[in-house]
Amino acid sequence: MSLRFFEKICHSSAISCPHHAAPNLPFKMAKLSSLSKEQPDYAFEMVCSTIRFGRGVTAEVGQDVKNLQSANTLLVTDKNVANTNAFKETTSSLKRYGVKFQVFDDVLIEPTDKSMLKAVEFAKNGRFDCFVAVGGGSVIDTTKTAALYASNPQADFLDFIGPPFGKSKTPENPMLPLIAVPTTAGTGSETTGAAILDLPQHKCKTGIRLRCIKPYLAIIDPLNVFRQANMPRNVAIYSGFDVLCHALESYTAISYNQSTSPYQPCRSTFVSGLKSDFRIMGLYFRRAVADTSDEEACTQMLMASSFAGMGFGNAGVHLCHGLSYPISSQVSSYYDPDYPRAKALIPHGLSVVTTAVADFELLAPICHQRMGEAAKLLGANVSERAKPADVGKYLCDEIRSFMRDFKVPNGLKEMGFKKGDIDSLTEAAMHSVPNIAISPTKVDKEIIQSIYEKSISVY
């Protein structure tokens, strides 16, 4: 395969925003001509994958891989997705265009360092020059990781992991091309430069955040979602909650023109938490859960997922996601009825929404205007005379309403956590949450502990 195009890509991932690259590496940007302390100029940039959205576009993936002149492609999925129309359509297209490929289907739901290392070793040994991911966020994140380390075989696994657990180094080589075909309306991973994994030894999740790992192309096909009439109900619910929190967190992040430094492209912008996402959630979330064969609802939710991915992929996420990582990692006794019972598991979207109410109650005095706008678009009747301090209640009531209607576990207690576990959750969250640069407010250990305590029971 000719890699000239990819070698021209600036693979120094230091040239990136703090959310996606190592914080100790400088962001290189042309100095703005009118920059001054009195009236600084601000700039933002948008980074995301190329997106092809449409009914039936999965059939084109073979042509795309062929155009990349791939000699040996790795197709990554999991054992459940391998039985879906999405995977069958992808393999059919690759065969139709004469693409040589192998399949890796040993992706773990909620990936760990060990499960990702398994994919990395498979990718290294196979000497692949192109990657295709067919699945949800776990599959896409695993494929990003496999492609990154296969492109940089000399690297240690912790080299690209973010702090405080990893070294957050800059890859020497550009990542080989990756095409993502999402099969859930949730993670938005097909548009971002992030891959999340669990480090059980640290009782917390972490991630790789480098702009170079964003997919070369995202093929977003509504047929891959709404056709799955057998998709478990809770998969649709938790995927939707992930969309909601992506949109809310990026929409309430510090604005790019409110930073103490004008050279901070990783901040909330006009695309962060697009208002259409909230409108879609209000109109279609319940419909998509009630009937996964509802094409209109599933298409809209898939669109919201990708747009929210673009939003948080540039602005970042803050409290909901930061506090969710210890919850997912420290699960010991919760088995969701719609997920495999091979081990205790708290799905990502569930862990994220669990603290959302307490998070936004904390942020209400700071973000009341945007929280009020989001609440209105979700369907709340927000009084025009409501005091700023009361506006947050409308948004939190909407979140509770979704949780109550879907009958999801009512807080940490129904997922097996006790008040005695709060200290462990808090200690793990202290690794990263206080350092989230785009959080609208600073948080300390006492605040984190308070949020977890309020999330023991939610509705």
Image: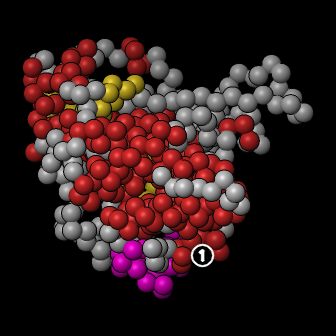
Total residue callouts: 1
Which quadrant would residue 129 be assigned to in this image? top left
Q: Residue at x 46, y 43 (%)?
A: 279
Residue 394: horizontal and vertical position, in percent? 56, 61
Residue 326 vertical position relative to residue 44 in the rendered view, above or below:
below
Q: Secondary structure at mark 1?
A: helix
Residue 143: horizontal and vertical position, in percent? 30, 40
Which quadrant would residue 133 be assigned to in this image? top left
Residue 192 is at least partly visible in this image = no
User: Which residue has dot 1 on it?
Assistant: 450
Looking at the rendering, the stretch of residues picked out in magenta corresponds to 410-434
Residue 421 vertical position relative to residue 395 in the rendered view, above or below:
below
* Residue 6 located left or right of residue 170: left
Give the color scheme: rainbow, by chain, secondary structure or one colour. secondary structure
Q: Residue at x 61, y 52 (%)?
A: 372
Residue 349 is at least partly visible in this image = yes
Q: Nearer the viewer, residue 283 or 274?
A: 283
- Secondary structure of the magenta portion, mostly? helix
